[in-house]
Amino acid sequence: MKEIVGLVAGIVMTTMLMLMGCSRESGSGSERSFEWQVDRFDDINVLRYQVPDFDSLTPRQKAFVYYLSQAALCGRDILYDQNCKYNLAVRRTLEAIYTTYAGDKTTRDWQAFEKYLKKVWFANGVHHHYSGDKFRPEFGAGYFDTLLAATPADKLGDIRGTLLDTVKRVIFDPTLYPKRVDQTAGVDMVSASACNYYDGVTQREAEAFYAAQVDTTDRQPISYGLNSQLIKDKSGRLVERVWSAEGMYGAAIREIVRWLERAAAVADTPEQEAYTRTLIDYYRTGDLRLFDRYNVAWVQDTRSRVDYVNGFIENYGDPLGYKASWESTVNFKNLEATKTTQIIGENAQWFEDHSPIDPQYRKPEVKGVSAKVITVAMLGGDCYPATPIGINLPNADWIRRDHGSKSVTIANITAAYDAAAAGNGFSEEFILRPEDRALRAQWGTVGNNLHTDLHECLGHASGQLAEGVRGDELKNYGSTLEEARADLFALYYMNDPKLVELGVIPTLDVARAEYNNYMMNGLMTQLTRIEPGKTIEEAHMRNRALIAGWVYERGRADRVVEFVAEGGKTYVVVNDYDKLRGLFGELLREIQRIKSEGDYAAGRELVERYGVQVDPKLHAEVLERYAALNIAPYSGFVNPVYIPQLDDAGNITDVRIEYPTDYTAQMLEYSQNYSFLPNRN
């Protein structure tokens, strides 16, 4: 699970001090001189992130980071193909035009073409990375034909004839693949979605196929369908194309394996080497039992300083919630900042025992909860260019029950967001009361990051399923409800004096700052990410709207939270923080019940009633006010570059780090050096 929008006071201070001491473009320059933003287009900021304290790693650890980073880049094409089967052909056509065009680059049409290409890079395909809506080009098909005519045929490779016609249709026909994931109630979500997890299969067929595989007596079930495409063979029989070294995506997976083998040889510990080799075996075979074995060993490893995620992990991109997108991160522990997060993990049982949920759904013994603050060193696949600020894995309920989970807060990404957003005028525009603006200024970053910590470390790790419930009964609503459950756990405990008692925060003003921010965002300001006339589709946004809308409605009579109109503008104001906490607890109790019992009908009712619809009048106002501030609602990153230093025998003796400043150059370099999959016809 990921927290994708953005630990405590000590964590933030430590991180910022470390960043201020990192003074190189290819290794130093103070935070003040570091240029965080490298590009801006459409609704997107492209930033850089620093990797403070990289030089504190040993040469062996640096080599491990380097090899894992190469593995992280090798899976890029997989995600493009998963998002839509013609994405690679579209990207390569656009890049062939871009790199060979010798005409006038000052025209409006060319600039629109360049913006479209940058959006495709950022989203890993033709659909918006967050909303899932297909991009609408701001240049015409005639201009595109002119560009194609000027592009050398050899640069287009096998993109010709029928495939080239399809590429043009994908770009210009708004009715073809309009949404990457379509979860509109009542539609066939498989047939209506552009994602490439199913081919020639209906929703009913897919659900029946996986329902027939489930063994309800298995206490350790594999994640059915996680690493495969479901198709019909020539006889019309449903079969899976498994993603493995010798199966679908084999060319890219073999490159990932090649770098993982090198990484295993320089792993931090023998245990880390062993589970890395298990991951390699899984990639070679596609055997999901091996993936489970890898996850069990990975979650038990709390000694290694350098760590990573690599694989088919999150199922947000599958409308049915079976299949996972490919992603990778490489990171290392922030030793000083992690001391505070460890306090949260060490007290996980106390939080579980005092949770407001039904006692039968509390875990009698919370196992293996570990939390740390990390410095990310490389982003790949579904974590690049847009990335989470917190991660909790593994996702399999039985592994979390029997072995625990790992939670991380990505401090250097949060620091980059904060530095880039400084002084953007948001608080003055959207926060009514001066005292609330002061709370945000003093405690907003601390509260946001504490929320992430509690969400990832305790929220996702909390609760248990009723006997006989598998965990997949909530289907297309499962991701939204799981994110809501984790958010509510965090929100409920943020305002608990226990956090002050433990020394995690100095004052409950931290919670008040986050309560103000969460309600304002869920009820109003996140609407800037929605196009006029659209509903809310993305799971995290639905989660926030659900929570904020439900507690607003339940607390309306007591004016716990209210909309206030002043000066022709609308504001969200929290009047009673204690009652708001109580409402968070009530909703947490119900959503935990829904998950524990697999109550699909109740889950659907909550999401559809509170998490989907948009007030068009409020929406229009938010868009107008955001436009006046000229704030891009989305941000992502370019990666650092790691340059190995070799001895005469070819062994890595050190690794030098550089921070690129050109988004386009990095994207073209990745397409040149890390593209291993063929175009689809």
Image (spheres, rainbow, N blue to C red):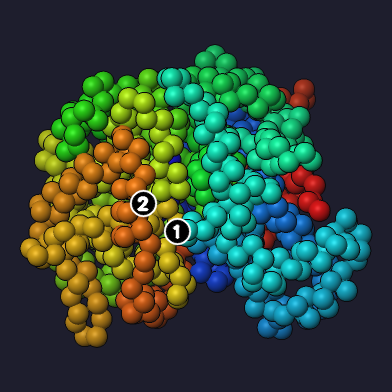
Is residue 422 in view from this perspective? Answer: yes
x and y percentages locating residue 493 in the rendered image:
19, 42
* In the image, residue 225 above or below residue 433: above
Amino acid type of disc 2? Arg
Looking at the rendered structure, the secondary structure element under dot 1 is loop
Question: Quick check: marks 1 and 2 in contact, CB under 8 Å?
Answer: yes
- The residue singled out by tag 1 in the image is 185
Circle nearer the N terminus (1, 2): 1
Is residue 629 in view from this perspective? Answer: no
Is 96 situated left or right of 625 in this image?
right
> Which quadrant of the figure has residue 348?
top left
x and y percentages locating residue 459 in the rendered image:
30, 38
> Residue at position x 23%, y 22% from top?
364
> Residue at position x 26%, y 38% from top?
593
* In the image, residue 536 above or below residue 500: below
Using the image as rendered, state which of residue 259 and residue 541 is in the foreground.
541
* In the image, residue 108 above or below residue 285: below
> Residue at position x 15%, y 54% from top?
580
Cα separation between marks 1 and 2? 9 Å
- The residue singled out by tag 2 in the image is 604
Question: Which image quarter holds the N terminus?
Answer: top left
Q: How many marks?
A: 2
